[in-house]
Image: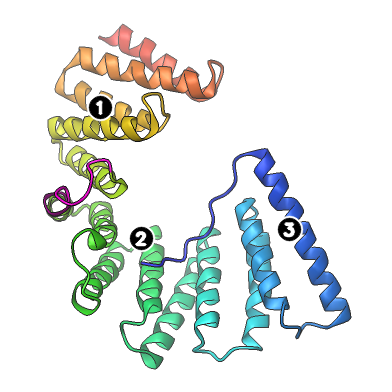
Amino acid sequence: MNRILLPASLHHSSEQIAVLKITEMLETLLTNILNLEGPNHVKVPGLYARIAMNHHKMGDFQKAVNNMEKAMNAFQTRYLENDPVLVSNKMVLGCMYQDIGRYQEAIHIFNTCRSIIEEDRNPQYPLLSLALWNLARVYQDIGNYYQAIKLFDQILKMKEEEEGLSGEYLVPHQLDLAVAYRKAAHYYQALELLNKVLRNDMVTLSPHDDNIIEAKKELVMNYWELGRYAEAATKAKEVAAAESIIKGVDAIELAASFYFQFRCYLELGELENSRATLERVYHLYKRHYGEKDERTEEMKDALGQFSKSY
C-alpha cells in the first residue's frame, strides 16, 4: 500500500540543524511571496505543506499542524473537493491531528476522505485503502479495536478480491490485522493469521525479510500473553538471530528480543538462560548508551537483583 506516513522525528543534531536551515529558507520565501504576490499565489499551499512536514521531522507537532491547516486552506481555494491532491493533503493533516491526540478531528477527516473517494471513484481507487488504513490506526490508538479489526479486515479483502494481490504482497496487511487482534486480546485469531503468513511466505521470502521478522515478533507477544513461554522464547531467539545477521551481533535492536527471552526463561525456571540473556541486554545497553545512562544502570540493578533472588 502506498501509505501516507509522516516522517520520523530526527535524532541527530546535524540533521536537525540542516532541516531547520531549510525550513527557515522556506519560511522566508513564503513570507516574501505572501507580501509581494498575496495568499493566492500558486506556490503558497505547497510551501505551507513542506514547512509543516519539516516541523514534524523536528518534533514540533503543533507547528506542523498550524502550517498544515494553512496549507489546507490554501489548497481548498485551488482544488475541487474530490481532487486527489486535496484528499491526500487532508489525510496528512489527519495524521498530524492523530499525533497530537486530536483523535476525533482525525476520525472526521479520514471519514470525510473515505466518503469522497467512495462517492467519486471506483472502489479500487488507491486512496480508499489509504483512508481506511489511517482510520483503522486512529481507532487502534484510542482502543476501539472492534472498529480497527473491521477496517483492517476490509482492507485485506479489498487487496485480495479487488486488486488481486496474493502471497508476499498481502503480508503487510495481514500483519496490521494480526496486531489489531492481539491488542483486542484475540490471541488465537492472531496466531492463526501469523502462522498462515509464515507457512505461505517462508517459501518465497527470506527468513531475514522484515515482514517475516515482524510476524515472528508478533508470535512472541501472543505466545507470551497465552502463557506459552517456551514457544515465545523460541521465536524470540529466532528474531534475535535474524536481526543479528541483518544489523550485526552488537545491534541495540537485539536487546528487546533478549529481554523477552529473559522473561520467558524466568517463567520456565531456566535460570542460567535467564541470566545469560539478561547479561546480553546489559552489555548492549552499556555499549550503546554508556555505563552512566539511566537505562544501563536500571539493567545493572536488575542483574544484581536477579543474583540476590536466584
Label whose residue precedes the other's in the sequence (1 or 2): 2
Residue 140, horizontal then vertical, whole percent:
35, 60
170 sits to left or right of 56: left
Tell me, what colour scheme is on the image? rainbow
295 sits to left or right of 223: right
At 21% from the left edge and 14% from the top edge, which residue is drawn?
A: 271
Task: Give the residue type at disc 2.
Answer: Gln
For label 2, the residue is 140
Nearer-the-camera pick, 36 or 281: 36
Residue 202, horizontal then vertical, whole percent:
16, 47
Task: Give the residue type at disc 1.
Answer: Gln
182 sits to left or right of 111: left
- The span from disc 1 to disc 2 (Cα, nearest Å) is 27 Å
Per the rendering, the mark at residue 23 is 3
> Magenta stretch: residue 203 in it?
yes
Between disc 1 and disc 2, the foreground one is: 1
Which region of the structure is painted magenta?
198-208
7 sits to left or right of 199: right
At 32% from the left edge and 31% from the top edge, which residue is drawn?
A: 245
Residue 172, horizontal then vertical, whole percent:
29, 58
Residue 13, horizontal then vertical, whole percent:
67, 39
Between disc 3 and disc 2, the foreground one is: 3
Classify mark 1: residues with Cα within 10 Å, few (<14), some (14-19) or many (20+).
Answer: many
Quarter occupied by residue 26: bottom right
Task: Give the residue type at disc 3.
Answer: Thr
At 70% from the left edge and 70% from the top edge, which residue is drawn?
A: 47
Placement of 292 over or under 228, stated as above or below: above
> Magenta stretch: residue 16 in it?
no
Q: Secondary structure at mark 1?
A: helix
For label 1, the residue is 261
Classify mark 2: residues with Cα within 10 Å, few (<14), some (14-19) or many (20+).
Answer: some
